[in-house]
Image: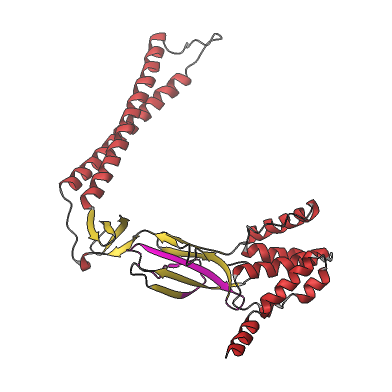
Amino acid sequence: MIQATLLGMCLLSAAPVDLRAATQALDDLQYQAALDRLPGQGSIKEWRREEVLEWFSTRALALLGLKREVEARQGFEWLFSLAPEWALPDQYGPRVRTFVSAARADAVRSGTVSLRFEGGLLRARGDSFGYARELEVFWREPNGATQQASLPLQELQPAPWPRERRLEVWGRVLGLQKSTLSEWGSENAPIRLEPMAVVNVEGGTPSRGLGGLGIVGLAAGGAALISTGVGTGFALSSQEAERTRSNATRDGDGRITSISQRDAFALDARVQREAGTATVFFVTAAAFATAGVGLVLFDRLRVVPTPGGALISVPLDASFAIAGGAR
């Protein structure tokens, strides 16, 4: 039984062993030997991300060493589409670094593999060469149980885990026969997400109307509109006086001759007075609007105790709320 187990382990590790041999040949500057020893792309089965990147980088560097620059350029673009952060080893000189940098720029412009969680949605992006095929995401619930889901690779989709609880999540982009192309966190270093989602509330019962604070908030919003309108009137009047002053006829010394000096001084005073008044009304409108929104949201704010702390929500209608966690 021990012999069978060892044989199985050797078969499973054959491809990475060949990969190490190819990498060693590259280190010894045996470029053709590195290509000959490199496993075929079909052998990349369930490899870790580090092994996938080593395969692509070894191939590209060996091709470049053999002066097969067109193939090497494509190899580097494949590599950077999966790992734009990959760094060239120190022993390579300026010519190689310039070549690699150009390939990196082209790959980044074309699109690179990525996976992240944003605003209640999973955002995933595949590479331009079609290596990325699917997503595999995991989450650890508060009781310690780990859940898993396989998902299609698409730009936006709802996250499969419950978002109204604090969770630890991680995931990866799969391709090349289930090999790992990109990772988002890990089991040992998960992404910790606080509750934040659109969640069902009140079982669909009618939401309560505004309370006293909410009504005051609406009144403040109305005051903001009125103040904005009055301020706009003063601003337009100030602009009209400014145009009249600017269009007045002047002599060679710059003095106004088409109207009296008294009227000119009056126009100047009107411009300054009404511009200042408009500014006061606009600032007042902004203050009323901010206070109004804050009062309405605070009036609808609800805090529900949870085992991990509290679920804070602001109901939007009879069925949904924007929720956030607090501990």
Outermost residue to the front: 2
**Colour setting:** secondary structure
Residue 260 picture location, percent across and down:
41, 10
Q: Residue at x 71, y 57 (%)?
A: 88
Figure quadrant of residue 284: top left
Q: Residue at x 79, y 51 (%)?
A: 94
Q: Residue at x 43, y 21 (%)?
A: 244
| Residue 163 sits inside the magenta stretch | yes
Q: Residue at x 68, y 78 (%)?
A: 15
Task: Specify whether 290 is left or right of 89.
Answer: left
Residue 4 picture location, percent across and down:
60, 90
Task: Specify whether 33 is left or right of 122.
Answer: right
Between residue 5 and residue 124, name the one nearer to us: 5
Figure quadrant of residue 13: bottom right
Q: Is residue 125 visible?
A: no
Between residue 290 and residue 189, name the one nearer to us: 189
Q: How many marks?
A: 0
| Residue 326 sits inside the magenta stretch | no
Between residue 21 and residue 287, name the one nearer to us: 21
Task: Specify whether 159 is left or right of 318.
Answer: right
Q: Quadrant of the N terminus?
A: bottom right
Q: Is residue 91 visible?
A: yes
Residue 85 picture location, percent across and down:
63, 57
Which residue range is magenta in the image? 150-178
Task: Specify whether 318 is left or right of 237.
Answer: left
Q: Does 146 sit above or below residue 207?
A: below
Q: Does 89 sit above or below residue 127?
A: above
Outermost residue to the left: 212
Q: Quadrant of the C terminus?
A: bottom left
Residue 221 picture location, percent across and down:
25, 42
